[in-house]
Amino acid sequence: MDKLLAIKVFMATAETGGFSAAARRLGVATSSVTRQVDALEQALGASLLNRSTRQVSLTEAGASYYQRAREILEALAEADASVADRGEEPVGVLRLCLPVEFGRRVIAPHLGTFLARHPALELDIDLPPLGEPRQLADHACLRFRYGQSARPWRLTQGEQCLELDISGPLRSANADLLREAAIAGSGVALLADWLVREDVEAGRLQRLFADWTVSPGNASASINALYLPNHRGSRRVMAFVAFCEGLLAD
C-alpha cells in the first residue's frame, strides 16, 4: 500500500462525503477509492469512516486522524514549496494575515495584478481585526481599542511632543466603525490616512492638526511586514513585500 496515496484518498473521501464523489475529484474509479480507504483502515486497525448507503462520515478516530493528516500534508507541501521557492520565480502558497480594513481597502483591489504577475503563487489570506493638541482632551474622542490597555494619543511636531489621555463615548476595535461614527459627527477619531483619504477629499471628514504627526502611544506610523525567520529569502515573501512597497509608495 502506498500510504501517502491512501491518506490523500481518505481525505478526499472525508471532504466530499462519499466514495463516488472522491473518485470524481481524483479522477479514478470508485472501487479504487474504496480499496485504498479499506487498506488504510486495516493498516491502522481502526475504522475511519462511518458508511451508509447515501454518504460517509468521520468516526471519532477518523476525525482525529484527518486533522493530523491534514497538518502533515500541509507541512509537506510547505517543505516542497520552500525548496522550489528559492528559484527564480516565487511558487507555492503565501499565507497572509492583514488588518481587516487595510486588507479590504488597500490590498484587495490590487491582488489580481499581483497574482497575474506571479501565476505560480496561491494566496491564503486572513483579515483579523487589530486594534491633537491639548484641547483634544476636552473633546469627545472615538477611540480604537487595543486589547484591555488604553493608549494616549501622541502628537509630535519637530522637537515638540504631546501625549494626551483622551476620552469619549465610543471605543471599538473596528476602524471602519469609528470612521462611520466620525462621519456622523459623533466625535474626533484618530484614523489612518489610507482609510479616510477619500472622505477628506469629498468633504465628509475634516483633517485636524495637519502640521502634526499623530500616533497611538509609541506606535510607529509605518506599515510593517512580519515573517518567520526561516522564511528569510523566500521568493514568495519578498515578491509580496516588493509589491506592497510599490503599491504604498505614495
Image: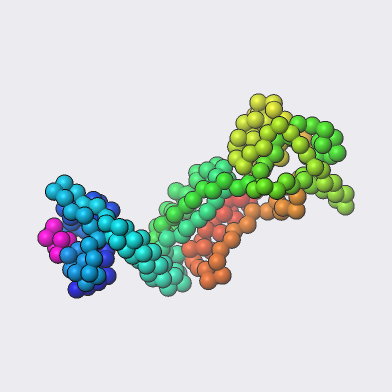
Determine the residue positioned at 50% across, 44% down. 109
Determine the residue positioned at 32% across, 63% down. 65
Decide whether the magenta segment is chiefly helix, strand or loop: helix
In terms of depth relative to the viewer, which is nearer, 238 or 34?
A: 34
In terms of depth relative to the viewer, which is nearer, 49 or 92?
A: 49
> Residue 82: in sight, yes or no?
yes
Q: Percent position (x, y) of residue 119?
A: 40, 57
Determine the residue positioned at 47% across, 58% down. 95
Magenta stretch bounds:
30-36
Split into 4 quadrants, where in the image is the N terminus? bottom left
State the image quarter where residue 142 is shown: top right
Is 210 placed left or right of 200 in the picture?
right
Q: Is residue 148 above or below residue 243?
A: above
In terms of depth relative to the viewer, which is nearer, 202 or 4?
A: 4
Q: Is residue 120 above or below residue 128?
A: below
Q: Percent position (x, y) of residue 33?
A: 17, 61
> Residue 107: in sight, yes or no?
no
Q: Residue furthest top?
A: 184
Determine the residue positioned at 60% across, 56% down. 245
Q: Percent position (x, y) of residue 168?
A: 74, 34
Is 103 placed left or right of 199 in the picture?
left
Look at the image and say whether residue 151 sits in the magenta stretch: no
In terms of depth relative to the viewer, which is nearer, 110 or 230?
A: 230
Q: Percent position (x, y) of residue 90?
A: 45, 64
